[in-house]
Image (spheres, rainbow, N blue to C red):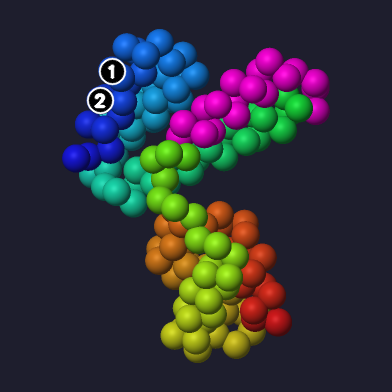
Amino acid sequence: MSLEEQINQDMKAAMKAKDKAGLRGLRAIKSALLMANTDGSGEEVNEEKEIQILQKLVKQRKESLSIYEEQNREDLAEKELEEIETIKKYLPEPLSEAALKAKLREIIDNLGASSMKDMGAVMSNANQTLAGKADSSMMAKFVKDLLK
């Protein structure tokens, strides 16, 4: 079952259950997927692209969350948290720090990277290999540490 079909089924269930928080998150996902399908680029929205879209949605909500918390808007912050939790259900299980470091070490060894000059190549490979399984800022931090 595709992500779009899963979202549609879950939206129906959320409507029946009167789950407003879950429905907001599901509508955001459906909207983002629809925009990607009709953006005119002609690119097919595959699983990798879906993961990127979901990660972008989570990132946007985390940024909004931090702004709302700074401004003491707990009502709006709570809505963002609820949407983040809903969207994260459709992302692959993130890797633990130890597993992420091991995968990055493996990528570095395979590429023969030995200095910070190689960071771009390592990050490019890591982003393709670990798409959706780790935060890119965390990957960058670990790659820097491993290349030093």
Residue in the image at 45% along x and 34% along y: 87
> Whole-percent x and y of residue 63?
65, 35
Magenta includes 23? no
Relative to 81, say whether 50 is above or below: below
Relative to 30, say whether 62 is above or below: below
> Whole-percent x and y of residue 105?
54, 80
Which quadrant of the figure contains the C terminus?
A: bottom right
Any part of residue 120 in sight:
no
> Whole-percent x and y of residue 73?
75, 18
Residue in the image at 67% along x and 30% along y: 65
Relative to 26, say whether 104 is above or below: below
Residue in the image at 26% along x and 25% along y: 8
Element at badge 1? helix
> Whole-percent x and y of residue 20?
46, 14
Q: Tell me the residue that label 2 is attached to.
A: 9
Q: Is residue 118 left or right of residue 68?
A: left
Disc number for residue 81:
none
Q: What type of secondary structure mainly makes up the magenta span?
A: helix
Q: Which residues are magenta?
A: 70-87
Kind of residue indicated by mark 2:
Gln
Relative to 75, say whether 81 is above or below: below
Q: CA distance from mark 2 to mark 1?
A: 5 Å
Any part of residue 21 in sight:
yes
Q: Tell me the residue that label 1 is attached to.
A: 12
Kind of residue indicated by mark 1:
Lys
Q: Which quadrant of the figure has residue 54?
A: top left
Task: Rate crowding at label 1 as few (under 14), some (14 to 19) or many (20 or more) other CA atoms within 10 Å.
Answer: few
Residue in the image at 52% along x and 27% along y: 83
